[in-house]
Amino acid sequence: MNPQDLKDYIVVPTLHTISDFIPNSLAAENLLLGTAAQESQFYYLDQTTSGPGPAYGVFQMECETHNSHLAWLKQKPEFWKLIQTYQIEWMDNCLEMVGNLYYATIMCRIHYFRVRETLPAAHDVLGLGNYWKKYYNTYLGKGKVDEFVRNYERFIKNLR
């Protein structure tokens, strides 16, 4: 997948669409793009290290995490109503994130929104990497901040 296309056609318009519920910012945009760069390199839709799952979509979110965000979302009736317009009627589960980039983007943004710590500055790549590691990959994950920075530099740095 072309990172510029994901930015222009999915991430930016999706963040704008949900901005009445979750604040939009360049930092949020860059964090989501950096997350996709690190987690899937804009290529993998299924965490393939040991067979299918447990993480899916361009942001490689685990089903347990998705389900937690979905339960939170369903407690917000107006936001939930908007999200349902982005879901395929029969796909009310984490596999929706594999083929529905809008939905995957919303779920990734919800993930970071639910963190109480303020987002790093938009162009602080090391700060974005540390934030991703602490709140997305966590200390249990195999990902490294320096990998995030390298993938950000490789895929995101030169986007317009």
Image (tube, rainbow, N blue to C red):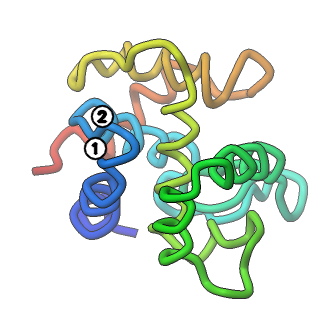
Instruction: Return the mark for residue 156.
Output: 1
Find numbered disc 1 in the image and state the secondary structure of the residue it sits on: loop
Q: Where is residue 153 in the image (x, y as percent from the top left)?
A: 30, 34
Q: In the image, is 90 to the left or to the right of 156?
A: right
Judged left or right of residue 110, residue 24 is left
Up-down: is 149 above or below 48?
above
Question: In the figure, residue 115 lies in which quadrant?
Answer: top right
Q: Tell which of 55 and 41 is nearer to you.
A: 55
Q: Residue furthest left?
A: 160
The quarter of the picture where residue 92 lies is bottom right
Give the crowd class for mark 2: few <14, some 14-19, many >=20 residues within 10 Å. some
Question: In the displayed image of the protein, which residue is found farthest to the right?
Answer: 50
Please tell me how many numbered marks the rendered image carries: 2
Q: Is residue 51 above or below residue 36?
A: below
Find residue 97 and report its horizontal and vertical position in percent: 62, 66
Query: What residue is drawn where x is 51% and y is 40%?
Result: 38
Q: In which quarter of the image is the N terminus?
A: bottom left
Type of residue at label 2?
Glu
Label 2, label 1: how many angstroms apart (C-alpha)? 6 Å
In the image, taking residue 17 as reference, residue 54 lies left or right, namely: right
Q: Residue at x 39, y 45 (%)?
A: 21
What amino acid is at disc 1?
Answer: Ile
Q: Which residue lies furthest to the front in this view?
A: 77
Residue 110 rendering spot, x and y as whole percentages: 53, 42
Quick one: 62 or 150, which is closer to the camera?
A: 62
Give residue 105's position: percent from left, percent from top. Answer: 47, 56
Mark 1 surroundings within 10 Å by alpha-carbon count, few (fewer than 14), some (14 through 19), many (20 or more): some
The residue to which callout 2 is attached is 153
